[in-house]
Amino acid sequence: MTTGTVTTAVPARLDRLPWSRWHWMIVVGLGTVWILDGLEVTIVGNIAGRLAEPGSGLHITAAQVTGTAAALYVAGACSGALFFGWLTDRHGRKKLFMVTLAVYLGATALTALSFEAWWFFLFRFLTGFGIGGEYAAINSAIDELIPSTYRGRVDLIINGSYWLGAIGGALLSIVMLDTGIFPMDVGWRLSFALGVVLGLVILLVRRHVPESPRWQFIHGRGEQAEQLVDEVERAIEREHGRRLPPPRGTLTIHQRRSIGFGLIAKTVFRRYPRRAVLGLSLFIGQAFLYNAITFGFGTILITFFDVPTGHTGYYFAVIAAGNFLGPLLLGRLFDTVGRRIMISSTYLLSGVLLFGTAWLFGRGSLTATTLTACWCVVLFFASAGASSAYLTVSEIFPMETRAMAIAFFYAIGTAAGGISGPLVFADLTASGVVSDTVLAFQVGAGLMCAAGLVAAFLAVKAERRSLEDIAEPLSVTPEERRPAA
């Protein structure tokens, strides 16, 4: 590996590629891990009651599962994002997205073998540790490999696929908790085992996903980057039966083996302060909505509408479907109408609609079915907005800081909404007092609206633009350096 000053057209060559089988391989190999995360979180939420029952094989309370274990999972995800995010920017995307998936698989398998509460807590933390690392490694790799024309919609749909896993987890829990099919101490363990099997399939596909050529040419591996892009171009030309147009523009950079954390922090907060405020606002708003309120949906159904514990999975599957349809149907608009309009409008719409839901709930005008319908509409927009938070922080900072930026904003937002949120709102949604739950709804709605207003003023026009045009690499030569936007 050598370093020096090089001129490359690799970014322009990647961005002008038409959609192909190669891109589908990237989406399947990297994007499907969100399905695993959705499966994990939903299964744990739905089996909490079973784990607390005598004969489950585990001495633990439902409050410990939904409180302590959930907080440890989120804490692990935040820690894993920061740790693996730093390693991803330093050692490459491919090494780390293989390691993080292996950590997830091992921890999930050992969770299924839990025999005491401390064991369950430990491996929930480590499962989250692997998932958090996935967020940093995967989002950075996807955005660097997907052409700029499709980057927004692909990123949103991939992040939204979390809810496909949530649908599967909700329906799977109904089967696994049926003691007529599986013994009480076996069904919940098999739920985790299924996640391991799915993860192993993803691991086999992921072996064929290459390192990011963008990372390679900056870290002294320019020849490998050029060779990889050559191979991809030849394959795509054969697939489409035509020659590719010439790339538009080159980039001259001074290659580096590593970037210091001090320079990363200085870049994010001193060179791009407005973008840092934007990233924090988007992540904190969506994290409170989802971690603090949405995942208490089952408790609300049981407490206020007397829905049987074994039936909450059906309702959750419905709102999970609404969550997935949002990014799926609105994703294209983020590339055509534009980032600023779509990010701000999805946040603001979901917040306003949630205020309306809170008002109807407070009046006693809702049933379990109509509340679920209201949540479906709210989350149709909220899910697209939440997915755009990951897209935003992965594309508005320089390449050398990308994985660490994703990790930092994910960790701060998730810690605020995923650790403090449940502690603040758990008593509100479980108290049985209507006004308490209305307050929980209103806080989530207010934070989403606030984030939407920030996006209306600070969102970056990133649609159909090269990543290097949105935020030039730190390694760019002084002759090509532009003022920060």
Image (cartoon, rainbow, N blue to C red):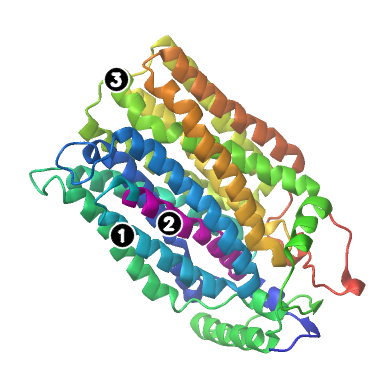
Looking at the image, is mark 3 or mark 2 earlier in the sequence? 2
x%, y% of residue 166? 36, 47
Query: Which element carries disc 2, helix, strand or loop?
Result: helix
Residue matched to label 3: 305
x%, y% of residue 335? 63, 54
Q: Residue furthest top?
A: 363
x%, y% of residue 148? 65, 64
Q: Nearer the viewer, mark 1 or mark 3?
A: 1
- Residue 126 has which mark? 2
Question: Disc 1, disc 2: CB below 8 Å?
Answer: yes
Residue type beneath disc 2: Leu
The residue located at (60%, 62%) in the rendering is 85
Which class describes the residues within 10 Å of circle 2: few (<14), some (14-19), or many (20+)?
A: many
Q: Main secondary structure of the magenta part?
A: helix
Residue matched to label 1: 110
Residue 338 seen in this snapshot: no
Q: Is 123 part of what is drawn in magenta?
A: yes
Looking at the image, is mark 1 or mark 3 earlier in the sequence? 1
x%, y% of residue 338? 67, 49
Q: Is residue 72 left or right of residue 399?
A: left
Looking at the image, is mark 1 or mark 2 earlier in the sequence? 1
Q: Is residue 99 left or right of residue 65?
A: right
The residue located at (67%, 85%) in the rendering is 221
Query: Which element carries disc 1, helix, strand or loop?
Result: helix
- The one nearer the camera, 472 or 113, is 113
Q: CA distance from mark 1 to mark 3?
A: 36 Å
